[in-house]
Image (cartoon, grey):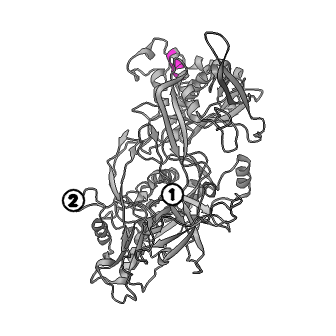
Amino acid sequence: MSTTSAPPIHHSPISFPLHVVFESDWGVSTGAGIAGGVDAVVEKDERGLPIVRGTVLAGVIREQAFVVADVLDRDGAGDSDEPYDDPPTWRGFVTKLFGDAEHPRLVGFTDARLPDDTTAEGAVHEVVSLSIDEDTGTAKQDFLRFFERAAAGELEGEAVLADFDPRGRPLVWKDNQVEAARLVLSLAGLLVRGIGSNRSDGDGVCDILIGDPLRGDSSAGEWTVTAVKKWCHSQLNSWKDTVPTAPKGDGEARAPEIAHAPDSGEKTTGAGRFFTATLDICLLTPVVSYEVPLSNEVRSLDFLRGTVLLPWVHRRLRAVAGDDQLVRDAVVAGDLLVSDATAVIRDDDGDPWQGMPVPLVLSRPKNPPQSGAANDDGTQPASPAEMTATNRLLAGEPEDVHKPLRAGYVFVPDAGSDGSGGVVGGIGAPALVGRQSTAHDPDTGGARSGQLFLVRALPAGLRMRATVTVSERLLDRIGPLLAGAFPHKVEARLGSRRLSGTYGRAQCELSAFTAADPALTEGEPAYTLWFTSDVLVRSPRLGPGGSIEDLLQAFRRAGAPVVPAGEHHAQGASASPPEGAFTAGVRHKRVDSWSAAEHQPRATRTVISAGSVLRVVAADGADSTAVLRRLAELSVTGVGELTAQGYGRFVVNHWMLKKEQIHFKELHQADFLSCMRTEPEERAVESTSGGHEEERA
């Protein structure tokens, strides 16, 4: 390889196959056990097979990569207190490759998994151990211990180089930088001698082989330790007296002048009609949706904010649109909006129902009848547990004690029920999964004291759905490019900790775009607004707002003057609500987020919480039909601030809120995990499916 000629440039994600070959029993323990069974279980994937998480691979390879860097810096540059020396050093390259407090990492690792044809039977076995008394050399009393071990074998994964920086700019990897990264990773992998627990007893002995067998480095077609060593030796000769530099984002971060942007962030009428498509997301690994950490717990929301999805969608469009200015400025110009992604379940007929935040005007008896309780003989009833919720918009103060519903999601069809009074949908929320992790001391190899933490995440197998909204002019521009930007299925990395490999992998599929024409329910004296996402509005002093008056002002500025129904009696109302009925159900909360580009938390925002409900009528002097039409338009694009990121979404006069009593089936975790799949099943689906088709109404 010549390092002096003009190196080629890579724009697509670059990955190296990774093989972990265990020569003895092994196991990455979870830190937990099974009551009445084993005292320590090993990490397993959704198939029940043992697995080495990407976080574990990143830790052991990073540790050895710095050893490699110090050796390559023959003149002792790696011992400098400054991590980035001028001229550059291998230690500086490795530091940027794996990241630090100022620079995000440039390499990630997927989980190392057993092949798809592996069966769970015999993959994990139990081992018995006991503790020896140091004084007598005999076994201690009551110190018998059972723990799980996995059999020797080979696991497969990938090392992936980042293709975008935190600011969304594409990372330009030159050929020599790719080869340098591969060299460091390959050498570091060869230095790793063990993974998992009980290494002092001989468990976890392995070889980590990182490279690309498609390059023909092994004539026999087998990726062995000898082949990796041979390739590394040839590369070391090529890199003599040469040190690589880390890639940088393509282009300068600047705010361009946008001639085609609308005059107001509140109104997006200048963009013309809007078209929507559904973005279906299947979580292949747990995904962390950022919430403020608490103590040593990394928390997660139970939905994905549009803030997470919008940059990913926009990057894919820009990748196929080149330097098109309309596509480049689509977000700030109001031409591209992405909603929050919430969980999806399947009804009895297999149709998808997307979850919407529970309306904050629903309540249920504090001591409801236990319809899902066990029978007298101890068996479970055939029908699932059900609950009845009371809509306080239409009902007065109940006779028995009620408690409000403030959390979870309701899953109902788009069309109304038949009015028979039966179950109309489901209610519940996906349960987050927790994984306990600890940092390790590089000197002793043991757990570092005080570094234990818990990560909560959305579970793998969860199906979610978001809505992508584009203007007519943007759709005219990107229509021919959609097949390239969003083929049948696209893998994405989403959420926090997505570079670890253990979290953030998802499979996404975008449907065809259709015209966004929400149905109008004219003739009603009042309009019920059910907010399906958090709403961010400004106070009169331009600071964080969130009061009902601030929200009404946002509607007025957006061309829909409305007032609360309780303060204004609509003309022609057929009947007044009963005494004690609500005209609104509004709650507020704080929203915090983290800026990966700035490496610091963003300012706290006060928002009106998703699930809030507001009963409004047209203001005096306003045309009711025009107000209703404008509300329908705003329900597509949102109201308030940051609508491109999914804030401010609502539905008008939803059929469910026209029922006084609503019957729900209570959902369980199994109802949400509907997209678990194996690699052979996915390949079979892809081989029988056609390409992406564009459709325009």
Q: Point out residue 643 in the picture as x, y percentages from the top left corner.
A: 39, 61
Callout 2–callout 1 Cβ contact below 8 Å: no
Query: Could you say which disc has been placed on residue 341 in the image?
Result: 1
Which amino acid, by three-letter code, is at mark 1? Ala
**Residue in view at x 70 percent, y 46 percent:** 679
Q: Is residue 401 above or below residue 498?
A: below
Tell me the SS state at disc 1.
loop
Q: In this view, does 35 lie to the left or right of 655?
A: right
**Residue in view at x 54 percent, y 36 percent:** 436
Q: Give the range drawn in magenta.
A: 65-70
Q: In this view, does 427 lie to the left or right of 555?
A: right
In the picture, the quarter occupied by the C terminus is: bottom right
Q: Point out residue 419 in the picture as x, y percentages from the top left corner.
A: 57, 81
Q: Point out residue 349 in the picture as x, y percentages from the top left corner.
A: 68, 68
Q: Point out residue 253 in the picture as x, y percentages from the top left corner.
A: 37, 44
Q: Name the residue under label 2.
A: 541
Q: Which of 140 and 80 is in front in this view?
A: 140
Residue 600, by quadrant, is top left
Q: Is residue 383 left or right of residue 588?
A: right
Query: Could you say which disc has been placed on residue 166 in the image?
Result: none
- Overall secondary structure of the magenta section: helix
Residue at the far front in the pictured view: 376
How many other residues sit within 10 Å of disc 2, few (<14), some (14-19) or many (≥20)? Answer: few
CA–CA distance in space, label 2 to label 1? 32 Å
Question: Is residue 587 visible in this depiction of the protein?
Answer: yes
Q: Which of 386 and 272 is in front in this view?
A: 386
